[in-house]
């Protein structure tokens, strides 16, 4: 989507500008897709908010709900963990596509495509399912014990 809108990327050659643009626009794109598939109106960005708070605002703007600093900080940490995730499948794919001379947006699409598989993108969903299974802190020891006992239905993610 960004490549068709910013079609002058190859002529411009300001790679840092387009990298910043990609990071800046991704929150809006994800929020737009989420709100579209949930049949809700799109919420425009609020430039007074931090990146994470703005993302939450565009995704779930519920006027009675105030985003706490804890939620925004947790999202900041999640974003950093995903960005600094070593040489995983999506990072390797982006680098491989880039080494062929593909433009930044094409490289990002290639990397995003690797998230489709259960071994990379599906791992995030497995973590969410594990946390939902654990449910509360008092259940952690029991969950860990099931993992240690070799339960075929319990996996530590």
Image: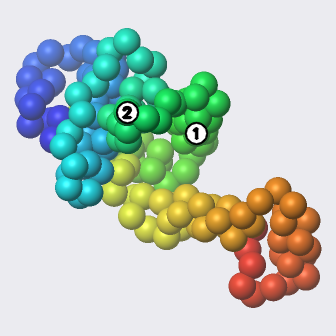
**Residue visible at 55% across and 51% down in the picture:** 88
The answer to whether residue 142 is left or right of residue 28 is: right
Which one is nearer the viewer's eye here, 108 or 35? 35
**Residue visible at 18% across and 43% down in the picture:** 41
Q: Quadrant of residue 25?
A: top left
Q: Which residue is mark 1?
A: 78
**Residue visible at 69% across and 70% down in the picture:** 133
Residue 146 visible to the viewer: yes
Q: Which residue is mark 2?
A: 63
Which one is nearer the viewer's eye here, 102 or 129? 129
Label 1 vs label 2, nearer the camera: 2
The answer to whether residue 126 is left or right of residue 36 is: right
Image mark count: 2
**Residue visible at 59% across and 34% down in the picture:** 71
Can you say whether 3 is above or below 37 in the image? Answer: above
Residue 29: x and y in percent read 26, 39
The answer to whether residue 4 is left or right of residue 66 is: left
The answer to whether residue 42 is left or right of residue 144 is: left
What is the quadrant of the N terminus in the image?
A: top left
Can you say whether 96 is above or below 16 in the image? Answer: below
Residue 105: x and y in percent read 24, 37
The furthest residue to the bottom:
152
Residue 22: x and y in percent read 30, 29
Separation of residues labelled 1 and 2 (CA atoms): 24 Å
Name the element at disc 2: loop
Q: Quadrant of residue 64?
A: top left
Residue 149: x and y in percent read 91, 82
């Amino acid at each position: 989507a960004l490549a068709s809108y910013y079609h002058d990327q190859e002529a411009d050659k300001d790679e840092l500008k387009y990298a910043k643009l990609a990071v800046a626009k991704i929150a809006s794109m994800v929020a737009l897709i989420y709100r579209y598939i949930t049949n809700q109106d799109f919420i425009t960005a609020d430039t007074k908010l931090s990146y994470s708070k703005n993302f939450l605002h565009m995704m779930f703007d519920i006027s009675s709900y105030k985003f706490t600093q804890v939620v925004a900080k947790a999202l900041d940490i999640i974003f950093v963990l995903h960005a600094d995730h070593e040489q995983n499948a999506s990072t390797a794919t982006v680098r491989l596509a880039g080494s062929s001379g593909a433009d930044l947006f094409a490289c990002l699409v290639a990397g995003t495509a690797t998230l489709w598989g259960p071994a990379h993108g599906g791992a995030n969903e497995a973590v969410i399912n594990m946390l939902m299974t654990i449910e509360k802190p008092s259940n952690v020891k029991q969950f860990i014990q099931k993992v240690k006992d070799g339960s075929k239905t319990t996996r530590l993610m």
